[in-house]
Amino acid sequence: MNMFARVVVLLLAAAPLTLAFAQNGDGLRDGLIAIGAALAIGISAIATAMAMGRIGSAGVGALVERPQAFGQILIYLVIVETIIIFGFVIAFLINGQIG
């Protein structure tokens, strides 16, 4: 299943969330906000996982050849982690918790 199909399945799975919020006055609005926040975290988590896998496997190969490069490889891995942190910040902004 390709990436687009997975996103569509996630959106369809999140559709009952909008109906759960529909009991209140602004149900559809609150549900769409929740889906937007979930997409911000979900897409950034998928991107982080893909990048961490590639950098991690290349880093292990580099460590076998040059063990003194551990610090440099660790920095590369930490830089990728900022993607998911930005996803969390955007999700909190969308929910109106901060900002």
Image (tube, rainbow, N blue to C red):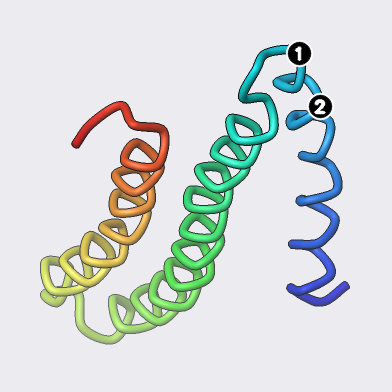
Q: CA distance from mark 1 to mark 2?
A: 8 Å
Secondary structure at badge 1 equals helix
Task: Please tell me the numbered disc located at residue 23.
Answer: 1
Left or right side of 86 for 40: right
Q: Which residue: 77% across, 19% down?
A: 20
Q: Position of residue 48 (x, y in %)?
A: 44, 63
Left or right side of 71 for 11: right
Residue found at the far front of this picture: 25
Task: Please tell me the numbered disc located at residue 85.
Answer: none
Which of the 4 quarters of the picture holds residue 1? bottom right
User: Which amino acid, by three-letter code, is at mark 1?
Assistant: Gln
Q: Which residue: 22% across, 66% down?
A: 79
Looking at the rendering, in which quadrant would you find the C terminus?
Answer: top left
Front tag of 1 and 2: 1
Q: Position of residue 2 (x, y in %)?
A: 81, 77
Task: Please tell me the numbered disc located at residue 19.
Answer: 2
User: Which amino acid, by three-letter code, is at mark 2?
Assistant: Leu
Q: In this picture, is 78 found above or below 29?
A: below
Q: In this picture, is 78 found above or below 57?
A: above
Callout 2: 10 Å neighbours few (<14), some, many (20+)?
Answer: some
Which of the 4 quarters of the picture holds residue 88? top left
Left or right side of 36 for 1: right
Q: Which residue: 70% across, 20% down?
A: 21
Q: Which residue: 23% across, 31% down?
A: 98
Secondary structure at badge 2 equals helix
Figure label count: 2
Residue 32 or residue 84, whichever sits in front: 32
Residue 40 or residue 25, whichever sits in front: 25
Q: Position of residue 86 (x, y in %)?
A: 29, 54
Left or right side of 99 for 3: right
Which of the 4 quarters of the picture holds residue 94? top left
